[in-house]
Amino acid sequence: MTSEAEDGRPFLIARGGPFYNLQLQAKLVHRTNLKPALRAAVFVAFAWGVPLLLCIVAGTAFGSATERPFLLDPGPWARFCLAVGLLVLAETQIENHLREGVRNFFSGPLLPETSRAVANSAVVKALRRRNAALGDLVSLLLAIASSIFLYYNMKGQPLAAWAATDGPGGQTASLAAWWTIVVSNTLFWFLAVRAFWRHIIWSMLLADFSKLETRLVATHPDGHAGLGFVGQYPNAYVLFTVAVSCVIAASVAHEVLHGSFTVTAIAQVMGLWLALVFAYFGIPLAGFMRLLADFKKRALRAASDRGTSFQRQVERKTFGKNLVADEGKTANDDELGDPAKFYDAAKKLSPMLVTRTTLVPVSAAALLPFVAIALTQLPIKELTPVLKRLLLL
């Protein structure tokens, strides 16, 4: 079997699997076009539009903020409108960036011929994982489990006006609430878990690539021995990060509205969330970081050894002999070059592929929904220093 990288086709992480095939049959996607805008509109209509219509019919779509009508409840907005739409749109963004990342491995001189066959096999393995039904099945089962948990968690809890209806035995879940439990919440968690699984597939592919023999160069201008492009991949997940951040920020907004969250608590949640985002995107690069750290040690050692030989050669030419441990002129005296520039470049080589520069877009995306909430509690002048500390600017 030939890999997509080998026969010229791109590595398309958003394709494959039963859910993708189902969308193909429904004409929601084309084999050459994911149709992100169309699918986002359709899924948002099912997840958020239908319960909105049910609430309009029931008269619970509008009202005072204290009653939490549907259109003033941050939870449905964040999870079923913004997050669902953004998760669908993110698929195309992620696919385009990761496809380019795989292409960079094969298009340049980074991989020697002996490594290309192994790399192709790694791509084939990643595509098999992508196409496997197990990933979509587990995603669906976890999504259903989350909806069951949501249903039981609603019992005994005060419900928003749109989610409750009066019955003979007291308040019961409304039709809109039932729809969000059975359809909207299940769809959101299915898309989120499925995206997480695809990120695991990408992480495993990176782990396989990090074990390949590569033509690393200590003096490469990217400062990462030629692997700098790998560290750019987190920027593919800007929309995904905004989607997940919206859901978490909506929970924080709920606590803020009830007066149980202080400004300090909001800042702490923002810091913790940012740390989790860094870990989420940094851990898949751990194999490359180890590779670069080992290469840096070897490059510095080689430059140091050559530096000793070169400087002793200079010493012999200057004084006619070495001042310590003189061994006379060697056969290589006219062949040695000064390794000083190489040594300086090797010292500057950074194994840390995840840097502030590469993570600024995704960090800003992670904090954006929280900023919107914090602005309701703090003036922008007081919020700016907090953001600067979190973004490490």
Image (cartoon, rainbow, N blue to C red):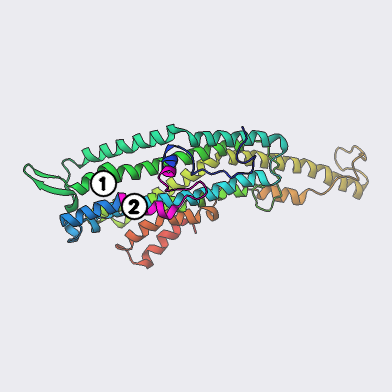
- Residue 5 visible from this viewpoint: yes
Where is residue 29 shown, x and y percent of the image? Answer: 45, 48
Where is residue 388 shown, x and y percent of the image? Answer: 45, 60
Where is residue 118 shown, x and y percent of the image? Answer: 65, 33
Q: Work out how far the residue at label 1 is from the one at label 2, CA to CA, in angstroms.
A: 12 Å
Q: Which mark is residue 160?
A: none
* Label 2 Cα neighbours within 10 Å, binned few <14 / some 14-19 / many ≥20: many
Residue at coordinates 70% horizontally, 39% vertically from top-left?
A: 298
* Label 1 Cα neighbours within 10 Å, binned few <14 / some 14-19 / many ≥20: many
**Range of the magenta residues?**
23-46
Amino acid found under the numbered disc labelled 1: Thr
Say which quarter of the image contains residue 190.
Answer: top left
- Residue 162 is left or right of residue 279, and the answer is left
- Residue 268 visible from this viewpoint: no
Q: On the image, numbered disc 2 is attached to which residue? A: 44
Contact between marks 1 and 2 (CB within 8 A): the answer is no
Q: Residue furthest left?
A: 168
Residue at coordinates 63% horizontally, 42% vertically from top-left?
A: 292
Q: On the image, numbered disc 1 is attached to which residue? A: 180
**Magenta residue check for 40:** yes
Where is residue 370 shown, x and y percent of the image? Answer: 36, 56
Q: Quadrant of the N terminus?
A: top right
